[in-house]
Amino acid sequence: MKKIMNFALVLLISSLILSCNMNNKGEEKPIKKEDMDLTASPVEDFNQYANGGWMKSHPIPADKSRHGAFTELADKNEKKLKAIVKEMTEANAAAGTVERKIGDMFATGMDTTAIEKAGAEPIKPYLEKIESIRNVKDLQSLLAEFKTQGMGFIFGFYGSPDKMNSDFQIPQLSQSGLGLPDRSYYFDKGEDAEKIRSQYLEHVQKMLEFAGENPEKAKRAAQNIMDIETRLAKASLTREELRDVKRTYNKMPLKKVDSLMDNFDWKTYFVSVGLPEPGEINVGMPDFFKELDKMLAEQNIEDWKWYLKWHMIDKNASFLSKDFINQNFAFYGQILSGQEEIRPRWKRVLNATNGVLSEAIGKVYVNKYFPPEAKQRMEKLVGNLKLALEERIKVLPWMGDSTKTLALEKLNTIKVKVGYPDEWKDYSTLEIKNDNYLANIMRARQWNYKDMLSKINKPVDKSEWFMPPQMVNAYYNPAYNEIVFPAGILQPPFFYQNGDDAVNYGAIGMVIGHEMTHGFDDKGRLFDKDGNMTDWWTKDDAERFNERSKKLVEQYNNVKIIDTIMANGELSLGENIADLGGLNVALTALKNTEQYKNGKEIDGFTPLQRFFLAYAHVWAQNIRDKEKIRLTKVDVHSLGRNRVNEPLRNMPEFHKAFGAKQGDYMFLPEEQRAYIW
């Protein structure tokens, strides 16, 4: 491939990695042969070759449905968070302080004596309110009341940026209301699908019984609930359809929203939820609300009451006594995901505490584990990868000059957030008490709802983060045109302060490139440099992009998951484009380093080989069959094995590094390869 980066950039990259190499001398080796399976062929199954040893020595823990390098890092982070929360719990901090709130939140969750004694009592007041419903007007009123408490049912209501004016926050209405993970679960054919639906009915019945309902009535109610959910599912867009950002943009005034439904008073609803002047509203799925309107007229009000009771129980099962918790796990954990054991209680309560006070815990996490110099190094590295993508865009053979100009403008205006927010969230008005676990959850929900409501019909605060610093993840936000890398991901196996160039570019470099490429994937490309949904491509360039993308769809559609279940290339297209694009961008940067030019082997592997091995290890994973099936239905990401093998089949540099040739699985014929970014 043509060298497209200048010498100054080479020096900058090399100095950055060299500065990383001066620290953490005790850091583990990034490429370990014991993590590999050297008996496997790298040109037939690179994932097995690169990760086979790790997979063998890291069986899935009983309390997980999958286990990988990603989750291993998350587990390490979890121990750090446990220590932070433990310190807060034992500190006896003053009332009202964030330390006291963290401690009280965790303590109430761990007070199993009080939780078991209470049984279903904490949820009874909410079920009694549902029981008092007499007609559709009462139903609407209670839906609004529950929403102000942070609990939405049947449909979604929230605020987010206007897709056509990303600087302004507007109200959004969306489809919702299902108890199974995806609409497909209600319609899939075959014995396994029928069995899951039957088990779901049993699950709903048992949960209603735990709440004190009569077994016979609960059994009949479960079927009525299933009927309602099936009808809602039929009216819902598929996950593939939801990826169409134009289809889900239907902004309209309140009067038009009201005209969609004869049996729901939207004006009264918005007054009741605290938004008397909603302005223009985006109705993501108008047909869903039209069908809901019919259902409100046709469905027996008693059936709606049972439906709401079930969803109230389901929403709060994790915060009630062990009969609710264990049954909830039996269905969603064991039956749907194959998980053998429930996670230890401290982990579940820690997760809830972390969710309620995420940035407060994150601030302590950053102070303890993420020094300022790490943030500075990462920001420089991101800058280098932006330059690499810029140079790649300039030489794209399939894109015209006018589209390239706008693509480069968008790239150069991408904002970068690294580590932690500049301003931390203020939790002073959040009330957490040492009284009751569910009560604390309810207070937190209400606080979050008020926070969300306060932002609607106001300018968007684009300094806001949507992941806490301690999270092991990263994201691209098209409305903000930003890439965000929380502190939690800036550790091995993603980032090695003492690692060589090839390893860091193959791991964190690829992650950076991946998130940048999301700005130009099949969804991201529809937003301009300011985050607005704008058609800035020429017709010919858009057609060429779509043709190239179709190759990835076809490639992944032909990947077998289990038996007759195949990967979903349409659902995962955006992530697959970003994986391949991220690899290409990171590799472009690597090719201009001194390490790559010298070609010196480390532990028997060339720089190019180490790049691909580091990339593969990021996605090392063992996963249960049931979880493979579930994720293939609901997740936009490909499974770990496919994130390793499938992008590499498109890359000549990989073929060169490991000697792949025509006829090998890892060698995709040139006419079938996707060359996009």
Image (cartoon, rainbow, N blue to C red):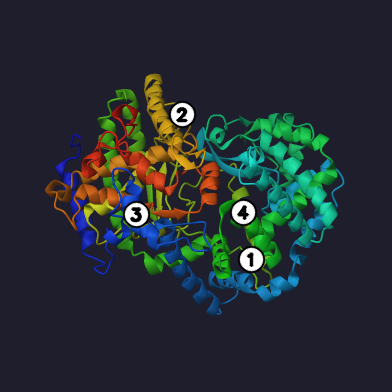
For the question of whether residue 495 can be seen, the reply is yes
Q: Which mark is residue 591?
A: none
Q: Marks 4/2: CA distance?
A: 43 Å
For the question of whether residue 414 can be seen, the reply is no
Q: The residue tagged with tag 3: helix, strand or loop?
A: helix
Q: Position of residue 179 (x, y in %)?
A: 67, 48
Q: The residue tagged with tag 2: helix, strand or loop?
A: loop
Amino acid under disc 3: Asn
| Disc nearer the start of the sequence (2/3) | 3
| Disc nearer the start of the sequence (1/3) | 3
| Disc nearer the start of the sequence (1/2) | 1
| Disc nearer the start of the sequence (1/4) | 4
Q: Residue furthest top?
A: 540
Select label 2 or label 3 by which is in front. 3
| Disc nearer the start of the sequence (3/4) | 3
Amino acid under disc 4: Ile
| Disc nearer the start of the sequence (4/2) | 4
Q: Position of residue 197 (x, y in %)?
A: 68, 45
Which residue lies under the disc numbered 1? 431
Packing grade of label 3 (10 A; few <14, some 14-19, many >=20) is: many
To which quarter of the image does residue 104 belong? Answer: bottom right
Q: Which mark is residue 335?
A: 4
Q: Which mark is residue 534?
A: 2
Q: The residue tagged with tag 4: helix, strand or loop?
A: helix
Which residue lies under the disc numbered 3? 51
